[in-house]
Amino acid sequence: MRDVADISPALLAWYDRNARVLPWRTGPEDHAKGLRTAPYRVWLSEVMLQQTTVAAVRNYFRDFTTRWPTVTDLAQAEDADVMAAWAGLGYYARARNLLKCARVVAFDLGGQFPRTAQELQALPGIGPYTAAAIASIAFDAPSTVVDGNVERVVSRLFALTDPLPGTRPEIARLAGQITPQDRPGDHAQAMMDLGATLCTPRNPVCALCPLEAHCEAHAQGIAASLPVKAPKKVKPTRRGHVYVLIGPAGEVLVERRPDRGLLGGTLGFPTSDWAEERPAFAPPLKTDWQEAATEVRHTFTHFHLILTVHRGLGHVDGMTGNNAFSPDALPTLMRKVWEAAQPA
DNA sequence: TAAGCGTGGAT
DNA sequence: TATCCAAGCTT
């Protein structure tokens, strides 16, 4: 009979030899000297990493921490500056909640993050995962972190063959059982590193896995087939028009989208509604509109979008009629629109 | 509770 | 090209 108490020591021994070097991470030698990653940096990195790869986060984390070194600096930033800095990273509610959270911490909590997962989870944009991650990584509290990696690793360790998300409560229970009192933050990061590098969704590298001898799915020869997931729904396709209006001095007509919903709070060009049947051509003003040669195709989490791009010259008043326009401040969809609107 | 919410890399 | 999926949260 395998003993779950043996799992974390084996994992931590592997982690001490193989931990990835990351800008927001400190190692055992730092911890021995009493140095840990500042809670601000743990929080910022964890929010950026929600449903987002390490590779995508790196530069954003560097830029944010350079520009806003502390939570109080961030709390004092302009909304538009933070939204522009987040542009391209996706899930823009994260950026809006990031700023809300920073302001609570800086202005209501004296600039100090709470130390318990329960208190952390009460803050905007911090859910069960992020609360446990901050508590364990920043404060070394024995909170159990469950993200997609942990779900996969635990599903395999215990050969859970029932489909997600139904097995989530059982996964959380088992993940808690293997969380140590000593070094819970390193244990959490080790679980995630393992999932990211060896215990991968496809073609897991069991031969190199420090937990091979503890893994029930490996023993059964079914590791690669776990976790089982409920089937996805097919994505519908929506269509629409988008209008890129350029003023006589090169100004560009952009508008800030409402805070709620898709691309909430980001800058963009005026568009029609998006529907399965492409809505009628109805530009924001009358001018000589030219249809761009290529449509813009973009896939969101739950639908495909095809936009017909129109460009026109006209008077740009109000809005962002200024030469501060930069496509860097746009979400990716709108960067594609801008690119497609350039004359050939 | 299930759906809404981005993006880019891997396969 | 199509699909999957990544350190999830909110409503």
Image (spheres, coloured by chain):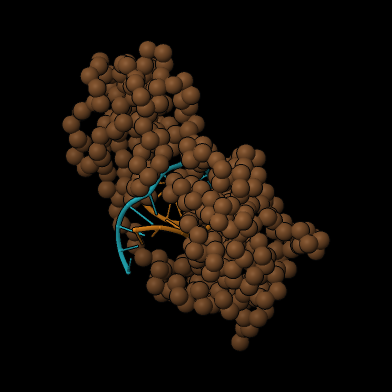
Chain colours: A brown, B cyan, C orange
In the rendering, at what x and y percent does residue A263 appear? Answer: 38, 43
| Above-or-below relation of A252 to A156 | above
Q: Residue at x 31, y 16 (%)?
A: A314
Q: Residue lying farthest bottom?
A: A1
In the rendering, at what x and y percent does residue C5 appear? Answer: 46, 56
In the rendering, at what x and y percent does residue A25 appear? Answer: 68, 55
* Quarter of the image where the C terminus of chain A is located: top left
Q: Residue at x 63, y 52 (%)?
A: A41
Horizontally, is A336 left or right of A241 in the view?
right
Horizontally, is A177 left or right of A33 in the view?
left
State whether residue A197 appears in this view.
no
Q: Nearer the viewer, residue A159 or A49?
A: A49
Indicate the quadrant where residue A62 lies.
top right
Horizontally, is A31 left or right of A329 in the view?
right
Indicate the quadrant where residue A58 lies.
top right
In the rendering, at what x and y percent does residue A148 appear? Answer: 50, 62
State whether residue A67 appears in this view.
yes
Q: Nearer the viewer, residue A87 or A265?
A: A265
Q: Residue at x 44, y 34 (%)?
A: A330
Q: Residue at x 36, y 16 (%)?
A: A247
Q: Number of marks in the image?
A: 0
| Above-or-below relation of C2 to A212 | above
* Quarter of the image where the N terminus of chain A is located: bottom right
Q: Nearer the viewer, residue A160 or A117?
A: A117
Q: Residue lying farthest right?
A: A33
| Above-or-below relation of A335 to A34 | above
Indicate the quadrant where residue A297 lies.
top left
